Image: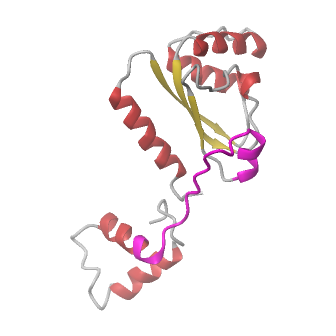
């Protein structure tokens, strides 16, 4: 982790939220390593203003989520997906040209994308190269520190190298 997948998703979320299109819902859900269908359903429900019955079975909640999502256009942002997520089981309608909805997911695994049928538009987020890493490091450190100093520069460069191009580490 740490290459910027979640940050990229945040930028997409913020951009669509700023636009504020009526009848269009942006829904962010963090899935994480342990898939918890009721928790995912609750997150979707909360973002849509639904009060899902906590005592209802996952299948009943899936129907409620499906009905609510089917009534509007949505952009579903699924962050940190570690394994195949059965969208139907959650209650998420398949995005199509007719419903004008989309799903974007972040994962470390191409296999997760393949297993979920998300192979059309894969965006590989890669670590930064050395020059980009140094630029981000300089920006994060700020102007108060003289990174060009002969006393600081070699150590700063070593830190940047050790971070391996991961923006989160820089």
116 left or right, relative to 80: right
130 is higher (above) or lower (below) than 82: below
Query: Residue 72 location, x and y as percent?
Result: 52, 15
Which residue is found at the position 41% from the left and 76% from the top? Answer: 131
* Quadrant (top left, top right, bottom left, bottom right) of the N terminus: bottom right
How far from the left and from the top, in percent, is residue 79? 59, 40
Stretch in magenta = 109-132
In the rendered image, which quarter is residue 140 located in?
A: bottom left
Res. 78 in view: no
> Can you give x and y, in whole percent of width and height, for residue 70 in the image?
60, 13
Q: Is residue 79 magenta?
A: no
Residue ID at (62%, 26%): 96
Q: Quadrant of the C terminus?
A: bottom left
Q: With 3 as the anchor, is 63 left or right in this view?
A: right
Residue at 59% in and 56% down: 124
Tell me if residue 140 comes above or below residue 119 in the rendering.
Answer: below
The total of numbered circles placed on residues is: 0
Q: Position of residue 169 (x, y in %)?
A: 49, 64
Quarter where residue 24 is shown: top left
Q: Residue at x 33, y 84 (%)?
A: 152
Q: How is the image coloured?
A: secondary structure
- Magenta stretch: includes residue 130: yes
């Amino acid at each position: 982790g740490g290459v910027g997948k979640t940050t990229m998703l945040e930028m997409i979320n913020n951009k669509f939220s700023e636009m504020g299109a009526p009848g269009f819902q942006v829904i962010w859900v963090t899935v994480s390593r342990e898939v918890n269908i009721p928790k995912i359903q609750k997150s979707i429900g909360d973002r849509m203003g639904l009060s899902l019955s906590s005592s209802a079975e996952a299948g009943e909640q899936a129907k409620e989520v499906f009905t609510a999502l089917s009534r509007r256009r949505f952009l579903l942002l699924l962050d940190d997906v570690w394994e195949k997520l059965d969208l139907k089981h959650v209650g998420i309608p398949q995005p199509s040209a007719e419903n004008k909805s989309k799903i974007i997911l972040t994962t470390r695994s191409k296999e997760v994308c393949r297993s979920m049928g998300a192979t059309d538009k894969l965006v590989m987020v890669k670590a930064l190269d050395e020059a980009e890493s140094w630029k981000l490091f300089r920006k994060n450190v700020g102007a108060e520190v003289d990174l060009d100093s002969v006393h600081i520069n070699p150590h700063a460069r070593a830190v940047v190298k050790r971070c391996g191009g991961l923006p989160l580490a820089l």
